[in-house]
Amino acid sequence: MKKIAVLFCLIAAQVAFGQHYNLVNDRFVNQQIESAIALSESGMHTAFKPWRVSEVNKVIHHPDSAWNVNLPNKKFYSTAVGKKIFSEHLLQIDHEDYSLYLDPLFGFSGGQDQFTGRNTYDNSRGIQVMGSIGKSVSFYTSFWENQSVFVNYVDSFVRKNNVVPGQGRVKPFGDGGFDYAYASGYVSIQPSKFFNLQFGNDKQFIGDGYRSLLLSDNAFNYPFAKITTQFWRLQYTNLFLAWQNIGNASNSGVGGYKQKFGTIHHLSYNVMQGLNIGLFEGIVWQGGDTTGMRRGFDPNYLNPIIFYRPVEFSRGSPDNVLIGLNFKAKLFKKYMFYGQLLLDEFSLKEVKARNGWWANKQAFQLGYSFFNLFGIKNLNWQNELNVVRPYTYGHFTAEQSYTHYAQPLAHPLGANFIENVQFLRYRIRRFGIEAKLLMAQYGADSLKTNGSYSNYGQNIFQGTAEIVGGPTEVPSIYGNTILQGVKNTLVFTDLNISYLINPKTGLRIALNLSRRSQRNVFETRNTIWGFVTLSTLLPNRYYDF
């Protein structure tokens, strides 16, 4: 029996060797995989997502196995139709030299917004194709076509920005709805065990929390090239990116597309068993200079070595540079603590003076996840605090801000906020329940008598100064504090009850009950809505803002 088990593991390892495509960043599916990895004794670098399947396989043999669910011993489940519904891809070809998997993608939901009385729905259909050629080349592509009627506050966001959060630009559809499309794809090449090369159009995420203050998957897809180098206790990632500002500087959604570029370095180091530290550096520059000349991708930033700041400074460049770090520490096998620190601008002299200098632009995150709480298997609790000072991620102009496609590249709230988000999750076989409580405060801009908005640091699309010798566009050089401006209090609660049908495709059915309360000195808006969803794998969608 032991020989058979060993033989099975060897065969599985050979089949999985060429699976260098990534897990889809679907939090519902991945949270069980994350728990399994966190409870393991592996030294897997977990901060940079999405993870490659070949890396996950080294820890848990295959992502599906994290769910540890078995089909009932009934005839239908062993038929061709039963397997396709409950345990296989729609098209599944496994060969010694290649593999190919094809699945339909969909997300159907219907509900009602109690604030407006409107019926809401989401009608998303698509397809995904992934596979491998030989042991070194993998690929993935997917496409979605969507029509939606959103709950009131998301609807307001879409009408203001002409963009669905994280999912691209829209055109009108039906009675108050929107039509929009979403595509992603990439090629992944593994020339040796030390290097992985990827290029395509997708999202990235850095961190071990629910939010990321370094780089999140909050915004729309973008072209990228990524080089991952891994040896000893180190993982080093070079990321080269092309982003866009749509519309004018105030991001109204009207006008042309303004291209900008970015490059990111991330060095992850396993200090010891259970302790990981990462160093982050990012830089953003606009595609054209102040004279209107096209600048394009600056070859000076192809330098693969961290840190760029001396290069950027020596060139007299006005580009936007961010540096930061992240950490993860595991105690007693089932307690994980994590955090991030980001520095956009930093002057030790001004910090010591405690005078509220506007350019002290920093952010930090602290969080923890407790697994198998009270000794109950699959009962997990996560608690996370995020704090971002005013004007963080912003720069001289919107074209240099840390944004893409009308959304921040880090946190959905932009800057000038304090947020606490908690999750309580429990799973028993295919059934799962998740309760979420999010509490946040942020300081919004106020409307001035001339019709413009003051810039208190929450809207990171607002420019903070003229590029050459002009006056600053912030109300005050000193005396700036977190939550300055019009204080808004946001409370978001959500209950999700789900049943997983197929672990390979993420097919599940779920019931959601949500409540959002937003309050400031001018108004109080309480939104309650419920909806039922039938869906497959879904890239993360952040509507909790």
Image (tube, helix red, strand yellow):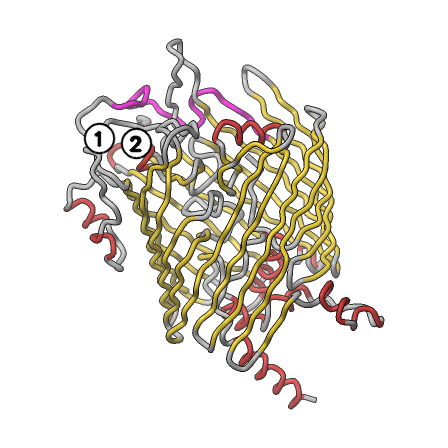
Q: Earlier in the sequence, mark 1 or mark 2?
A: 2
The residue shown at (53%, 44%) is 181
Q: Provide the major secondary structure of the magenta segment.
A: loop
Marks 1,2: beta carbons within 8 A: yes
Amino acid type shown at disc 2: Thr
Does 192 appear in magenta? Answer: no
Q: From this viewpoint, is residue 458 visible? A: no
> Is 177 placed above or below 261 here?
above
The image shows residue 508 at horizontal and vertical percentages of 70, 54
Residue 494 is left or right of residue 144, and the answer is right
Residue 426 is left or right of residue 98, and the answer is right
**Residue at image mark 1:** 467
Between 131 and 212, the residue placed more toward the observer is 131
Kindly state the secondary structure of the residue where label 1 is placed.
Answer: loop
Amino acid type shown at disc 1: Ile
Please state the extent of the stretch shown in magenta in the rendering.
472-490
- Quadrant for the N terminus, please: bottom right
**Residue at image mark 2:** 397
